[in-house]
Each structure stands twice: as C-alpha cells, then as structure tokens.
Amino acid sequence: MNDATGTAVLDVWCDLQCPDCHRAQPDLAALRERFGDGLTIRLRHFPLPRHQHALVAAQAAEEAYAQGRGDEFVTALLARTDELGTRGTGLLVDLARELGLDAEEMDTALIDGRHMLMVDADQAEGAALGVTGTPTYLVDGQRLDGGKSQEGLRERIEEIVAGVLSRAA
C-alpha cells in the first residue's frame, strides 16, 4: 500500500493483550529505524475473544491517541500484557496516569464507549481481509500472519517496503 505522500504504509492488526504483539515490538522499532519517514506504521485493532481485556484495551489506546500519547500508551501496555490479564481496566487507568494522561477522562471514555466504533471498524476490516490472529501485517496488498510465527517476517516486510519506496521514487 502506498499513500498519497509516497510513503509505504504498514497496517498492523494487533490485540493489546497478545504476547505475540508484544514480541513484535522490536521488529516494528527496527522498521521505523530503517525507513524513517518513508514508512507509516498504523495500529489496527483486532481484539481476540480469548483475551478478556483486549476490547477495553483497544478503546483505551484510542483514548490515549485522542490525548496525544497513543504510541507511548500502546508500547507501555504491550510490555504489561500479563498484568492486563489480572488487573484489566484498573491497569489501563493507572497506566494513563503514569504517562501523564488525564486518567479521569480515560476512565470516562472506557465507561461511555466513545471509541468503540473505531475499534469495531478496525476489527471488521481485518476480518474482511482474512485476519484471524495477531499480529497480522498488511503492506502493499500483502497480508503476512505473525500469529503463528514471527520468523522471517521483518525481512519480508523490509523487502516489500523497499520495493514500494523504489516504485515511488
């Protein structure tokens, strides 16, 4: 996929309670480092039914983005997937507070469900594209499933992104 600015776009369908999504973070950081502004990485929500707090975590991430600190929130939350499993909403509000976000507004957003449509739209689009597990990547029309194994995925994504950027040049 190539957006109007000539950059490559990598969509990452993620469940914020998924340990595999946490393990994918170093690869995403390496991709950001290698391609800089030439690559836009977009988080797409795909909460899995087996993760009890994934849906509310996706809504919390959207509230963190609304407050201007979404990437930090997502990174911090993925580092605490085990804790999310035991603490649920309490962790989400505490994490917002730790990051300097408006924790009361986070709590209110989780109660009123203001970000549910965004999460539902991501999940529906992912399902329509054949996403069944997380993390799943979509780049230049190619879907890569990282839910089974991360082995070789970063290298494959690098090849595809390099190809997109060379075509845009």
Image: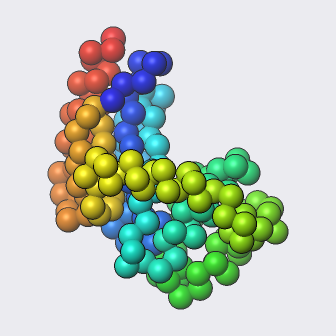
Q: Is residue 145 left or right of residue 125?
A: left
Residue located at (30% from left, 42% from top): 138
> Compared to 136, does 105 lie above or below?
below
Tally the marks: 0
Instruction: Determine which quarter of the picture holds residue 90.
Output: bottom right
Lateral position of residue 9 relative to residue 117, left or right: left
Q: Position of residue 140 (x, y in %)?
A: 28, 32
| 69 is higher (above) or lower (below) than 16 | above
Residue 34, quarter of the rendered image = top left
The quadrant the C terminus occupies is: top left
Q: Quadrant of the N terminus?
A: top left
Q: Which of 30/89 is in front?
A: 89
Q: Residue furthest top?
A: 169
Q: Position of residue 116 (x, y in %)?
A: 59, 59
Tell me if residue 22 comes above or below residue 141 in the rendering. below
Q: How was this image coloured?
A: rainbow
- Name which residue lies at 79% across and 63% down: 105
Q: Residue at x 51, y 69 (%)?
A: 55
Residue 69 at x, y percent in the picture: 67, 51
Q: In the displayed structure, does residue 154 sit left or right of residue 100?
A: left
Q: Is residue 136 visible?
A: no
**Residue 149 seen from this side:** yes
Q: Classify residue 139 as left or right of residue 113.
A: left
